[in-house]
Each structure stands twice: as C-alpha cells, then as structure tokens.
Image (cartoon, rainbow, N blue to C red):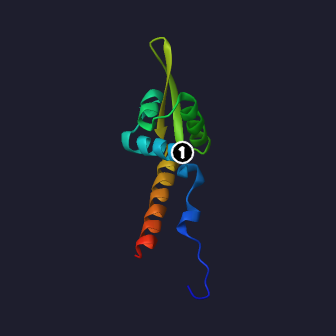
Amino acid sequence: MAGKTRLSPAIELDGVVHERVRLAILSALGSHGRLSFNELKALTDTTDGNLSTHCGKLESAGFIRAAKGLFGRRTRTSYEITTAGREALLSYLEQLEKIMGEVRGH
C-alpha cells in the first residue's frame, strides 16, 4: 500500500461482541429466539456466574433484553436479542468476512 496506511478490519471488531461467551450468547439468541437462562447456560457451556456476568454486559450495551417471570414457585429469567444486538452481531460477522477475504487475498 503505497503512501496510505489502512487499519486491519480486525481493529474494527466490536469488543463487546468479540468475547467468545458473549458471541455465543448473541449467536444462540439470534438463531433460537428467546431462551431461558438454563437453556443459554447449556448452549454456551458456562457457569451460572459467568453467564450472568456476560448477559449483564450485553444487557448494558442494549444487545439483549431479560424478562423475568414466575414459573410455578420459581422466578425464571429468559433472554432475547434486541434489534441493536442483531445489528451488532451482523456487523461483527461482516467484519469477519472482510478479514477472511484479506487473508485469502480476495
């Protein structure tokens, strides 16, 4: 690249989405729709504490929404991806495609 410095598309990856557990959460919600805490825990193979922490970060970013309700005598938490979360996930995947194209020479 003569005379022009260009940043790698990898620099532009969203740090909130890029973390592997958060990416797994967004991917699961993006493809399955609403999931309970336990369903997400099983799909992402995480502990209760780890999943809670990552869901909290995604909620704070506006990427997922939590809903709590009673199921029998227990409170049940479920999650769904928001429009902003879906857009962030799709943007992240587009950036990965750009990176793959550069590495492959396309």
Looking at the picture, how far across and down is residue 13, in whole percent?
55, 59
Looking at the picture, how far across and down is residue 22, in whole percent?
52, 44
> In the shown orientation, is residue 56 left or right of residue 106?
right
Mark 1, Cα crowd under 10 Å, few <14 / some 14-19 / many 20+, is many
Of 77 and 8, nearer the camera is 8
Identify the residue position indicated by label 1 in the image: 63
Looking at the picture, how far across and down is residue 84, in whole percent?
52, 49
Name above or below for residue 80 compared with residue 98.
above
The residue lying at 43 percent from left, 64 percent from top is 97
Of 99 and 28, nearer the camera is 99
Looking at the picture, how far across and down is residue 67, in whole percent?
51, 29
The residue lying at 52 percent from left, 40 percent from top is 64
State the residue lying farthest toward the top: 73
Quarter containing the N terminus: bottom right
Name above or below for residue 21 compared with residue 94.
above
Query: In which image quadrant can residue 62 be found?
Result: top right
State the residue lying farthest toward the left: 32
> In the shown orientation, is residue 36 left or right of residue 7?
left
At mark 1, the secondary structure is: loop
> In the shown orientation, is residue 16 left or right of residue 77?
right
Of 61 and 20, nearer the camera is 20
Residue type marked 1: Phe
The residue lying at 62 percent from left, 79 percent from top is 5
